[in-house]
Image (spheres, helix red, strand yellow):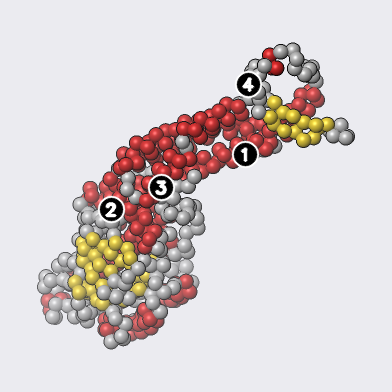
């Protein structure tokens, strides 16, 4: 039986290798806060959430398949919790049976497997009863197919036959086997036989039956007992292997059921955590069309870290090939960039997005590039390190991927950094890569306007007093990021008032500021 709650064609494997860029995504988007909320203290839920987020689906059809299942989960939390509890209970059966299979001892393996299957049969009965009770409440193809499989393959006749065969395999009346003696006197062609029911036929109750021959092994005949044990082991070897395989098959089904339900449980945990903070959450629209739109989009990781709802932003991109975000330092640029990246990952994983509305196309990969801390081992400078990481990204990036750049190449002077950024961004956009770029480099942002890249711009504003609203607005880049008024606020000076409210800031000072 197949679970297939996350994909109609394959089983989700949380232990599959993560992409090489997974750690950069975790650090740059602060995803630990997201996974902690999805796990809600359960390490297994957190691990599944991490795996699903870092390896999202790339097909709109698969995303829609998961979203339909998610709607069922959110509408039927008790039923889903019951299914998850049955899976957990079934997986606990192995831990409850002390005897373990022993390599080279098929009779012990058989006994262990039979004992497990007897208990697993009870869990299968519980599962099919629960599925029958809740079937009508679910609408998604994923859950209805799962319930149909359970009803079809675990019907009354099958369960009755299964329990009867397990009773036989306990060998209560003894073990019946047949064998022949070879030319060299060795036993050959051993076959395990099904035992006859007691007194089942007329001739079984009369003395007209053929004579039976028997032998008894003396109590101290160790060699005889070993020979008989060897005969038993050889007789049950094939059956033991088959029963053990059946046991693992049932356990694998419950294991996969737990894994795939765990993702939806994690999404439900995340939604509850965001609702407690007053953060909007929606099931997004994921298509294969260009453009991206959002209403009240915010960074869920910031909300979970700060314990309060951050300011949401709206977005409307037509082509969506290149978005450049400029404006006031500490005005919310980097936060919005993280919100976009997290929303893309959650949307494609089939989860929820921290927004009132969000729509986007699928991306083959979500990649990040930004500044890093100074290399304490002094192996290379910051610009060399940035160029090296960008080179690695370019080696793996493909058309249709999404690249998030946060103050990339700001570690050198503005003229050099702007030229590098323009060359790299132009090449990527022309190759079909979608780029979201947060920058304070006016030369770069201004050059993008005339580069024919179809760039769209957002700007982080501030009012005359230097207050940041954290609400981005459409607008061409300005020649200042208003870092001077931040300096005044921290050090009590009035440099901004002495001029025109903040002239062209020093790019190096701005680049070292952790913009929010």
* Marks 1, 3: nearer the viewer: 3
Q: Earlier in the sequence, mark 1 or mark 3?
A: 3
Q: Are marks 3 and 2 in contact (CB under 8 Å)?
A: no
What residue is rendered at 50% in x and 58% in y?
17
Quadrant where the C terminus is found in the figure: bottom left
Distance from label 4 to label 1 (Cα)?
Answer: 24 Å
Q: Name above or below for residue 427 compared with residue 38.
A: below
Q: Look at the picture and state if 227 lies above or below 43.
A: above
Q: Which residue is mark 4?
A: 197
Residue 438 percent coordinates (x, y): 30, 73
Residue 75, placed above or below residue 320? above
Q: Can the viewer see residue 329 in this picture? A: no
For label 1, the residue is 242
Query: Which tag, 4 or 3, sits closer to the chain's start?
Result: 3
Q: Is residue 245 left or right of residue 467?
A: right
Residue under numbered circle 3:
145
Circle 2 residue: 304
Q: Quadrant of residue 475?
A: bottom left
Residue at 51% in and 30% down: 160
Mark 3 or mark 2, whichever is nearer to me: 3
Distance between the alpha carbons at the discs numbered 1 and 3: 27 Å
């Amino acid at each position: 039986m197949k679970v297939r709650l996350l994909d109609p064609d394959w089983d989700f494997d949380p232990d599959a290798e993560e992409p090489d860029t997974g750690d950069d995504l975790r650090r740059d988007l602060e995803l630990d806060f997201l996974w902690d909320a999805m796990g809600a203290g359960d390490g297994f839920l957190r691990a599944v959430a991490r795996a699903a987020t870092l390896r999202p689906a790339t097909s709109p059809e698969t995303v829609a398949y998961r979203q339909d299942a998610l709607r069922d989960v959110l509408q039927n939390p008790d039923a889903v919790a019951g299914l998850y509890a049955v899976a957990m209970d079934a997986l606990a059966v192995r831990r409850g049976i002390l005897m373990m299979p022993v390599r080279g001892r098929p009779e012990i393996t058989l006994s262990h497997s039979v004992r497990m299957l007897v208990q697993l049969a009870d869990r299968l009965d519980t599962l099919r009863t629960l599925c029958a009770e809740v079937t009508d409440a679910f609408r998604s193809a994923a859950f209805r197919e799962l319930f149909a499989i359970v009803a079809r393959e675990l019907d009354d006749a099958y369960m009755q036959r299964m329990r009867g065969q397990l009773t036989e395999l306990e060998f209560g009346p003894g073990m019946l086997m047949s064998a022949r003696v070879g030319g060299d006197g060795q036993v050959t062609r051993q076959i395990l036989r099904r035992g006859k029911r007691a007194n089942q036929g007329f001739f079984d109750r009369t003395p007209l039956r053929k004579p039976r021959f028997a032998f008894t092994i003396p109590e101290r005949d160790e060699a005889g007992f070993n020979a008989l044990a060897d005969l038993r082991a050889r007789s049950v070897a094939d059956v033991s292997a088959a029963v053990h395989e059946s046991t693992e098959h049932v356990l694998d089904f419950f294991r996969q059921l737990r894994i795939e339900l765990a993702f939806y449980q994690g999404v439900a945990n995340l939604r509850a955590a965001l609702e407690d903070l007053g953060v909007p959450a929606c099931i997004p629209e994921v298509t294969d069309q260009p453009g991206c739109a959002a209403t009240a989009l915010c960074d869920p990781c910031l909300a979970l870290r700060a314990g309060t709802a951050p300011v949401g932003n709206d977005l409307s991109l037509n082509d969506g090939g290149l978005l450049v975000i400029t404006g006031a330092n500490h005005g919310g640029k980097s936060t919005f960039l993280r919100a976009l990246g997290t929303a893309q990952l959650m949307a494609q994983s089939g989860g929820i997005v921290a927004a009132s509305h969000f729509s986007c196309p699928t991306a083959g990969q979500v990649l990040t590039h930004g500044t890093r801390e100074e290399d304490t081992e002094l192996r290379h400078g910051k610009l060399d390190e940035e160029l090296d990481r960008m080179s690695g990204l370019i080696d793996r990036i493909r058309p249709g991927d999404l690249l998030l750049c946060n103050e990339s190449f700001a570690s050198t002077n503005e003229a050099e950094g702007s030229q590098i950024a323009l060359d790299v961004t132009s090449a990527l956009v022309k190759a079909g890569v979608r780029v979201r770029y947060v920058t304070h480099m006016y030369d770069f942002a201004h050059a993008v306007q005339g580069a024919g890249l179809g760039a769209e711009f957002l700007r982080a504003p501030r009012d005359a007093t230097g207050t940041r609203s954290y609400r981005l607005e459409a607008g061409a880049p300005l020649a200042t990021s208003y870092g001077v008024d931040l300096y005044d606020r921290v050090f009590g000076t009035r440099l901004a008032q002495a001029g025109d409210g903040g002239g062209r800031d020093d790019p190096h000072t701005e680049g070292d500021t952790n913009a929010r």
